[in-house]
Amino acid sequence: MSAERMHHISKEQFVKIRVKFVKSMDDIDSFLDEALANGLLADGHKQGIGALKNVYDQARQLHDYILRKLPDGSEKFVSALKKSNHDQILELLDDPEVYPMKFKPHGRVVIINNIEFDDEKKYEKRTGSEKDVVGIEKLFKEFSFNVLTYSNKKAKEMKDIITKEAEKSTASEDCFVMFLMSHGAIGNIIGIDGDELSYSTINDALKESSQLKDKPKLIYINTCQVSSDKKNEYFNVADLYVAFATVPEHLAFRTKESGSVFIESLISVYEKNKEKCDVNSLSPKIHAQIPKESGQISSSYNTLKKKVILRATI
C-alpha cells in the first residue's frame, strides 16, 4: 500500500513552540521566498515583515502570519520549511502528547463481522450488523483509512486474518484499527463454527508484529460477554486501546433497523467530533449515548502513551 505524507499542524501546537520558532528562524528571507512561491504567504506579508528591523521581531511577525494560515496551510508551511532547510523547526512541529498521523492513508481498518452461524439454534443470526459495517466503512474512510471487511469466519479463520493483517503493517502506516463483531463469551469471540477465539490469541498477534510496535492499535469488540468455562483472557500490549460493547456477564444489543447499539453510539459520537476525534477521551460519551433502557454498559481498556486523534480529511 503506497502512502502519501501528510501534515496537520494545529494552532495550539504552533503557539506552544512560538519562542523556539523565533529563535530557530535564522534565514527568514529564504523561507519567505519559498512561502511566497507556493502561495502560503503574499507580498503584503513580506512587506510587513521587512518593515521591522529587529530579526526577532520579524520572526515573531512571521509566526503570527503563519498561525492564521493553520491548519489548512500545513502542507505549504512544511514544504517551505523543507526547501529552506529549516530542519530544526520541522522537528518542533510534532505534538509530543499525540501519536503522529503523517501518512495518507493512515493505515488499515480490519472488520470481521459474523452474521450467520452453523448452529442456528444456539447462535441466532446477527441481523442488522450489516448496517454497522456500512457506518464503520464510511466513517473511517473519512478519517483517511483503507477498510477491509471479512464476513462469516470460523474461529481459526479469524485468527489467521488477524495474524496476517498485523504482519502486513508497514513503516508507512500510522495506526492499526480492528472491529470484531460476533457472538461472544467472556474473554472470547465466537466464530461461525461455534469455536472461540480468545483475547489472548489476538493479543499475541498484535504483540508479535514488529511494525506495530510503538504505534497506536485501536480494537473495538462488539460482542456479548456471557459466562464462559474457559480461563480469563486479557490484553497486555503497549500502545493499545480496546473498546468493549459491554462488560462481563452482560449482553450487547442490536436491532434489525439500526444495527448494534454500541456501534451506532460510537459512530454518532465520532461523527460529531470528526474534525478532532480524541479517541480515548470520547469513551464516556459513547457510553452516555447508549440508551439507558437497554442496560448495556460499554467499557474500555488502554495502554496508550499519548493521545490518538483522528481527523476527517474528505
Image (spheres, helix red, strand yellow):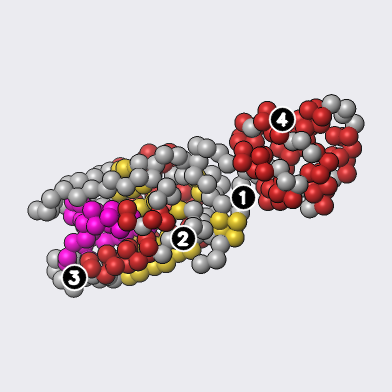
In the image, what residue occupies the spot 77% across and 32% down? 59
> Which of 21 and 45 lies nearest the eye of the viewer?
21
Report which residue position mark 4 lands on.
Answer: 23
Mark nearer the N terminus (4 vs 2): 4
Above or below 60: residue 140: below
| Label 3 neighbour load within 10 Å: few <14, some 14-19, many 20+ | some
Q: Which residue is disc 1 drawn over?
A: 7
- Side (left or right) of 229 relative to 51: left
Q: Tag 1 or tag 2, which sits nearer the N-term?
A: 1
Amino acid carrying label 3: it is Asp
Distance Cα–Cα, label 1 vs label 3: 45 Å
Q: Is residue 129 magenta?
A: no
* Residue 4 falls in image quadrant: bottom right
Q: For the residue marked with disc 1, what is the amino acid? A: His
Residue 197 lies in the magenta stretch: yes
Looking at the rendered image, the disc whose residue lies closer to the viewer, 2 or 1, is 2
Q: Determine the CA span between mark 4 and mark 2.
A: 36 Å
The residue that label 3 is drawn on is 193
User: Which residue is rendered at x = 51% and y = 49% of the image?
Assistant: 310
Q: Residue at x 84, y 26 (%)?
A: 54
Q: Nearer the viewer, residue 75 or 298?
A: 75
Residue 120 position (above or below residue 189): below
Residue 75 at what x, y percent from top left?
A: 68, 51
Marks counted in the figure total 4
Determine the residue positioned at 53% across, 50% down: 101
* Residue nearer the viewer, 218 or 91: 91
Query: Residue 299 in the image: x percent, y percent?
Result: 30, 43
